[in-house]
Amino acid sequence: MKLRFTKMHGAGNDFVMLNGVSQRIDLSSQQLRALADRRFGVGADQILMVEPPQRAEVDFNYRIFNSDGGEVEQCGNGARCFVRFVHDEGLTHKRVIRVHTLAGIIEPQLQQNGNVTVDMGVPRFEPLAIPFDSTGLTPMTEHREHLWPLDIGHQVMIAALSMGNPHAVQRVDDVTAAAVTIDGPLIENHRRFASRVNAGFMQIIDRHSIQLRVWERGAGETLACGTGACAAVVSGIRRGLLDSPVKVLAPGGELMIEWRDSIPESPVLMTGGAVTVFKGEIEI
C-alpha cells in the first residue's frame, strides 16, 4: 500500500505522522517497524496516528506506536506535534483540542507563537497505578518522595511514577557521563515493571532547570521525551530539589514544565515547539 506521511519532531524526538482521518490505515507491527526503520524506512522514534473520534466529547483519537511496533499509552512531544499536524492538514481550526489516548483525554493548546502547551494529566505514584511491584522493598523517603532501591546488578535509587505511562527517574551528578545505554535497558526490562518502563537520568542545574536523558521503553535513548521531562520535574519537586516552572534541557532541545504540587490533583503542563521536517509517500 502507498502511505502518505509527514515527518515531524519535538525537541529532536522524531515522529512519522499519519492521517487516519483522510485515509484508512491498518498497519501490522511488522509494517510499523519497517516504517520506523532509519535505514530502510522513514525513520522515527514513534509513529503517531490521527483517527476520527470514537466518542462525542473529543475531537480526535490519538494512537502511539513505538519503533518496535508496540502501541503505548502516551507521548508528550508527540502530542505537541499532533496539534500542529491536524492544523496543517486542515482537520481543525481549534487552538485547543480534546484528544483521546490510551491513557485518557488530553487537551493540547496551540499558542500564538507556534509553541504548544499540553495538559499531561495528574501524575500517579501508587505502585499499582504505574505498575510497579514494590513487594519486599523498603523505600527511602526524601522530602515527599519515595526512592526505591532497584537491583540491576548494582543498586540504583529510583522514583517510580506514572504520567499515563510508567517512569523510573534517578538523579545523577553528570548526565553526560551517566550509563544511560547500559543501565537504561536493564531498568526498562526489570521484572518489577510489568509493562516495562521509561528510564530517566536527571541532573539538577538549579531550582528551575535540569538536564535530562531518557531511555524510552521500546525506542531506546531519544533526543527528548515529553512524559519523561514531566516525570523528572515532578520527582524533583517532590524531593524538594526543584520549584515550578522548570526548564528541561534535553539533547534535542528545551521544554518548559509546570506543576502546582500544592494543589491536590494538579495536572502537569508541558510547553515546547513542534516542527515539520518533510512530507512524503512510501510504499509499504
Image: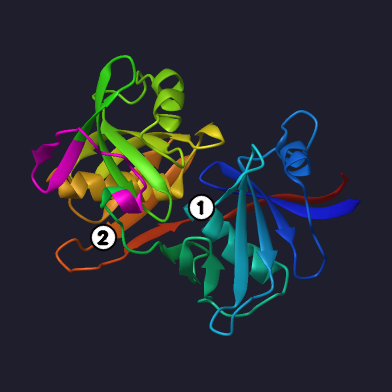
Which residue sits at x=41%, y=59%?
Answer: 271
Question: Which secondary structure class fits the magenta region best?
Answer: loop
**Does residue 20 lie above or below 38 as drawn?**
below
User: How many residues crowd mark 2 within 10 Å: few (<14), some (14–19), many (20+)?
Assistant: many
Kind of residue indicated by mark 2: Trp
* Residue 68 seen in render: yes
For marks 2 and 1, give the one nearer the viewer: 1
Report which quarter residue 213 is drawn in. top left
User: Which callout, 2 or 1, points at the residue further toward the start of the chain?
Assistant: 1
Q: Is residue 3 magenta?
A: no
**Residue at the bottom extreme, as displayed:** 56
Range drawn in magenta: 128-147
Kind of residue indicated by mark 1: Cys
Which residue sits at x=31%, y=57%?
Answer: 123
Instruction: Kindly state the secondary structure of the residue where label 2 is placed.
Output: strand
Tell me the residue that label 2 is attached to. 259
2 and 1 marks in contact (CB < 8 Å): no
Q: Is residue 50 left or right of residue 205?
A: right
Q: Is residue 231 left or right of residue 92?
A: left
Tell me the residue that label 1 is attached to. 75
In three-dimensional space, the C-alpha distance between marks 2 and 1, rounded to whole angstroms, equals 18 Å
The residue nearer to you, when weighing 39 against 1, is: 1
The residue nearer to you, when weighing 137 against 220, is: 137
